[in-house]
Amino acid sequence: MEVRSRPDGLSERLPSNGKKVMKAKTVINSTMLACLVALLGTPLLRAQPDTATTTPQRGQLSASDYRFAVKAARGGMEEVELGQLAKEKGSSEAVRSFGNHMVADHSKANDELTQIVSRKGASLPPALSRSGRSTIDELQKSSGPEFDKTYAKEMVKEHKKDVREFESAAKDISDPDLRAWVEKTLPTLQQHLQMAQDMESTVKGEK
């Protein structure tokens, strides 16, 4: 025990480990504070998205122009993959020939679009959309005449939609370079639609 004098002349006994008790409390408080910071701070840091690496950037493009570019790029990638599939699995010459056109034309258009977007300081997502991947997965399950008819029907539907979207984009796109690409690509898509309709008629007539 430690003895301490009081103003009234009496003495007061303190535990000999009084200073140690105070130090222990300080250590405990510091430890609790560190744990609290770790518990609260870590989830907050993890919750913040790494936009520099996970989110494609639109650079100088407006939000609407960028959305169109992303959709067009994904559509083009889907057409290339489906075209490759048609070249490999098509039982009809019309289907294989159409698939060859899709690979060549959409690969070229995709490259041009990527260059334009890159010059604007933007980047495009490298992956297909979920619906695009689902379409490819479904077609991979079919073969022979069934594949030909399903592919032809899908190409007519998709190119009708593409033509409508590009016609609207030719009026609405604000970036001059992107709009010029749309105007250049639109006639090719219109030609693809006619080819797809002819292909569909051909495979429907084949037994």
Image (spheres, helix red, strand yellow):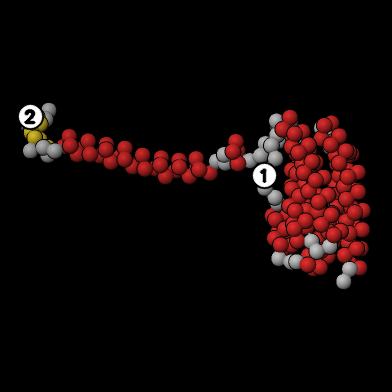
Q: Residue at x 70, y 40 (%)?
A: 124
| Residue 74 picture location, percent across and down | 74, 47
- The amino acid beneath tag 1 is Pro
Whether 89 is drawn above or below 14: the answer is below
Identify the secondary structure beneath mark 1.
loop
Q: In which quarter of the image is residue 24?
A: top left
Task: Find residue 47 and name its label.
Answer: none
| Residue 171 picture location, percent across and down | 89, 39
Residue under circle 1?
A: 126
Judging depth in this view, the residue of 23 and 154 nearest the camera is 154
| Disc nearest the viewer among 2 and 1 | 1
Image side of residue 118 versus residue 159, left or right: left
Residue under circle 2?
A: 9
Judging depth in this view, the residue of 207 and 64 nearest the camera is 207
Whether 164 is drawn above or below 154: the answer is above
Lower sequence index among marks 2 and 1 = 2
Identify the secondary structure beneath mark 2.
loop
Q: How many labels does the image show?
A: 2
| Residue 23 picture location, percent across and down | 22, 35
Q: In which quarter of the image is residue 180?
A: top right
Badge 2: how crowded within 10 Å, few (<14), some, or many (20+)? few
Quadrant of the snapshot with the C terminus = bottom right
Mark pair 2, 1: CA separation: 86 Å
Q: Which residue is drawn at 89% across and 59% down?
A: 199
Kindly indicate whether the residue at mark 1 contacts the one at mark 2 (C-beta within 8 angstroms): no
| Residue 134 picture location, percent across and down | 70, 59
- The amino acid beneath tag 2 is Gly
Q: Residue at x 57, y 41 (%)?
A: 49
Image side of residue 44 versus residue 124, left or right: left
Badge 1: how crowded within 10 Å, few (<14), some, or many (20+)? few
Q: Does the image show residue 192?
A: yes
Q: Which residue is drawn at 87% across and 65% down?
A: 203
